[in-house]
Image: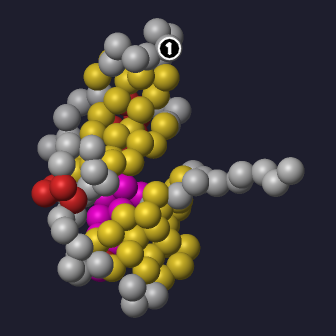
Protein backbone atom coordinates (compact mmCIF):
# COMPACT_ATOMS: atom_id res chain seq x y z
CA UNK A 1 0.00 0.00 0.00
CA UNK A 2 1.25 3.49 -0.78
CA UNK A 3 2.08 5.88 2.07
CA UNK A 4 1.00 9.53 2.19
CA UNK A 5 4.04 11.63 3.00
CA UNK A 6 3.06 15.31 2.97
CA UNK A 7 0.27 17.84 2.64
CA UNK A 8 0.85 21.34 1.32
CA UNK A 9 -1.32 24.43 1.43
CA UNK A 10 -1.74 26.00 -2.02
CA UNK A 11 -2.70 29.68 -1.86
CA UNK A 12 -3.72 31.93 -4.76
CA UNK A 13 -2.09 35.37 -4.57
CA UNK A 14 -2.58 38.53 -6.61
CA UNK A 15 0.97 39.88 -6.24
CA UNK A 16 3.53 37.09 -5.96
CA UNK A 17 6.43 39.39 -4.99
CA UNK A 18 4.47 41.01 -2.14
CA UNK A 19 3.32 37.63 -0.85
CA UNK A 20 6.78 36.06 -1.06
CA UNK A 21 8.21 38.98 0.94
CA UNK A 22 5.48 38.53 3.59
CA UNK A 23 6.12 34.81 4.03
CA UNK A 24 9.92 35.12 3.84
CA UNK A 25 10.50 38.28 5.87
CA UNK A 26 7.42 38.30 8.10
CA UNK A 27 6.94 34.59 8.79
CA UNK A 28 10.48 33.28 8.34
CA UNK A 29 9.86 30.87 5.46
CA UNK A 30 12.64 29.96 3.01
CA UNK A 31 12.19 29.89 -0.76
CA UNK A 32 12.60 26.38 -2.15
CA UNK A 33 11.54 27.11 -5.73
CA UNK A 34 10.47 30.23 -7.60
CA UNK A 35 9.24 30.92 -11.11
CA UNK A 36 7.22 33.67 -12.74
CA UNK A 37 3.92 32.25 -11.44
CA UNK A 38 4.83 30.01 -8.50
CA UNK A 39 6.83 30.06 -5.30
CA UNK A 40 7.29 27.07 -2.99
CA UNK A 41 8.29 27.95 0.57
CA UNK A 42 9.11 25.96 3.68
CA UNK A 43 9.88 26.34 7.34
CA UNK A 44 10.53 23.51 9.80
CA UNK A 45 8.99 20.93 7.46
CA UNK A 46 5.83 22.98 6.77
CA UNK A 47 5.47 23.67 3.05
CA UNK A 48 3.38 26.29 1.26
CA UNK A 49 2.84 26.84 -2.44
CA UNK A 50 1.94 30.33 -3.67
CA UNK A 51 0.39 30.61 -7.11
CA UNK A 52 0.11 33.92 -8.98
CA UNK A 53 -3.60 34.29 -9.75
CA UNK A 54 -4.23 37.98 -10.51
CA UNK A 55 -7.89 37.41 -11.42
CA UNK A 56 -8.84 35.23 -8.45
CA UNK A 57 -11.60 36.45 -6.17
CA UNK A 58 -9.88 37.85 -3.07
CA UNK A 59 -9.88 35.44 -0.13
CA UNK A 60 -11.33 38.12 2.15
CA UNK A 61 -14.47 38.27 -0.05
CA UNK A 62 -15.17 34.54 -0.16
CA UNK A 63 -16.36 34.03 3.38
CA UNK A 64 -15.47 32.99 6.86
CA UNK A 65 -13.80 29.65 6.21
CA UNK A 66 -12.34 30.12 2.74
CA UNK A 67 -8.58 30.02 2.18
CA UNK A 68 -7.92 28.92 5.74
CA UNK A 69 -4.65 27.28 6.79
CA UNK A 70 -3.87 25.72 10.18
CA UNK A 71 -0.26 25.14 11.20
CA UNK A 72 0.46 23.26 14.41
CA UNK A 73 3.59 24.40 16.28
CA UNK A 74 5.57 23.37 19.35
CA UNK A 75 5.80 26.75 21.12
CA UNK A 76 3.01 29.05 19.98
CA UNK A 77 3.87 31.87 22.40
CA UNK A 78 7.50 31.88 21.23
CA UNK A 79 6.38 31.93 17.58
CA UNK A 80 4.03 34.82 18.32
CA UNK A 81 6.89 36.79 19.92
CA UNK A 82 9.16 36.00 16.94
CA UNK A 83 6.60 37.17 14.39
CA UNK A 84 5.96 40.37 16.34
CA UNK A 85 9.73 40.99 16.42
CA UNK A 86 9.78 40.47 12.63
CA UNK A 87 7.37 43.41 12.27
CA UNK A 88 3.92 41.79 12.56
CA UNK A 89 3.24 43.75 15.76
CA UNK A 90 -0.55 43.97 15.34
CA UNK A 91 -1.03 40.22 15.89
CA UNK A 92 -3.63 39.21 18.46
CA UNK A 93 -2.08 37.29 21.37
CA UNK A 94 -2.40 33.50 21.60
CA UNK A 95 -5.53 32.27 23.40
CA UNK A 96 -6.48 28.94 24.95
CA UNK A 97 -9.42 27.42 23.08
CA UNK A 98 -12.00 24.95 24.46
CA UNK A 99 -10.93 22.32 21.89
CA UNK A 100 -7.55 21.93 23.60
CA UNK A 101 -5.41 24.25 21.49
CA UNK A 102 -3.64 27.54 22.19
CA UNK A 103 -3.88 29.63 19.01
CA UNK A 104 -3.43 32.94 17.27
CA UNK A 105 -4.50 33.96 13.79
CA UNK A 106 -3.12 36.32 11.18
CA UNK A 107 -4.24 37.49 7.78
CA UNK A 108 -1.91 37.57 4.79
CA UNK A 109 -1.72 40.42 2.26
CA UNK A 110 -4.26 38.50 0.12
CA UNK A 111 -6.67 37.92 3.00
CA UNK A 112 -5.78 34.27 3.61
CA UNK A 113 -6.22 33.40 7.26
CA UNK A 114 -3.50 31.34 8.92
CA UNK A 115 -3.93 29.96 12.43
CA UNK A 116 -0.93 28.79 14.42
CA UNK A 117 -1.82 26.41 17.25
CA UNK A 118 -0.28 24.27 19.96
CA UNK A 119 -1.94 21.46 21.90
CA UNK A 120 -2.60 22.22 25.55
CA UNK A 121 -3.03 19.85 28.46
CA UNK A 122 -6.80 20.18 27.95
CA UNK A 123 -6.55 18.34 24.63
Residue 69 on the magenta span: no
Q: Is residue 15 at least partly visible in the picture? A: no
Name the residue at 44% across, 76% down: 39
Q: Is residue 31 at least partly visible in the picture? A: yes
- What range of the chain is rendered magenta? 17-28
Name the residue at 45% across, 43% down: 71
Q: Quadrant of residue 13?
A: bottom left
Residue at the disc numbered 1: 123
Residue 110 higher or lower than 46, as above or below: below
Q: Regarding mark 1 in the picture, which secondary structure is present there? A: loop
Q: Is residue 119 left or right of residue 64?
A: right
Q: Name the spot of residue 30 as percent of width and height, x first.
A: 49, 66
Q: Name the spot of residue 47 as percent of width and height, x first.
A: 53, 59
Query: Callout 1: 10 Å neighbours few (<14), some, many (20+)?
Result: few
Task: Name the foreground residue: 68 vs 119.
Answer: 68
The mark total stands at 1
Q: Main secondary structure of the magenta part?
A: helix
Task: Name the foreground residue: 111 vs 121.
Answer: 111
Q: Name the spot of residue 66 as percent of width and height, x first.
A: 28, 51
Residue 22 on the magenta span: yes
Residue reaching furthest to the right: 1
Q: Name the spot of residue 102 as percent of width and height, x first.
A: 38, 24
Task: Name the foreground residue: 67 vs 96.
Answer: 67
Residue 48 higher or lower than 3, as above or below: below
Residue reaching furthest to the bottom: 36
Task: Name the foreground residue: 63 vs 17.
Answer: 63
Amino acid sequence: MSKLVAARQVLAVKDLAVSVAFYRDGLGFSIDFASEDWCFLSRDGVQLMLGHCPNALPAAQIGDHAYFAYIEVEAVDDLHAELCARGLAALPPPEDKPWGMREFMLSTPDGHRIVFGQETDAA
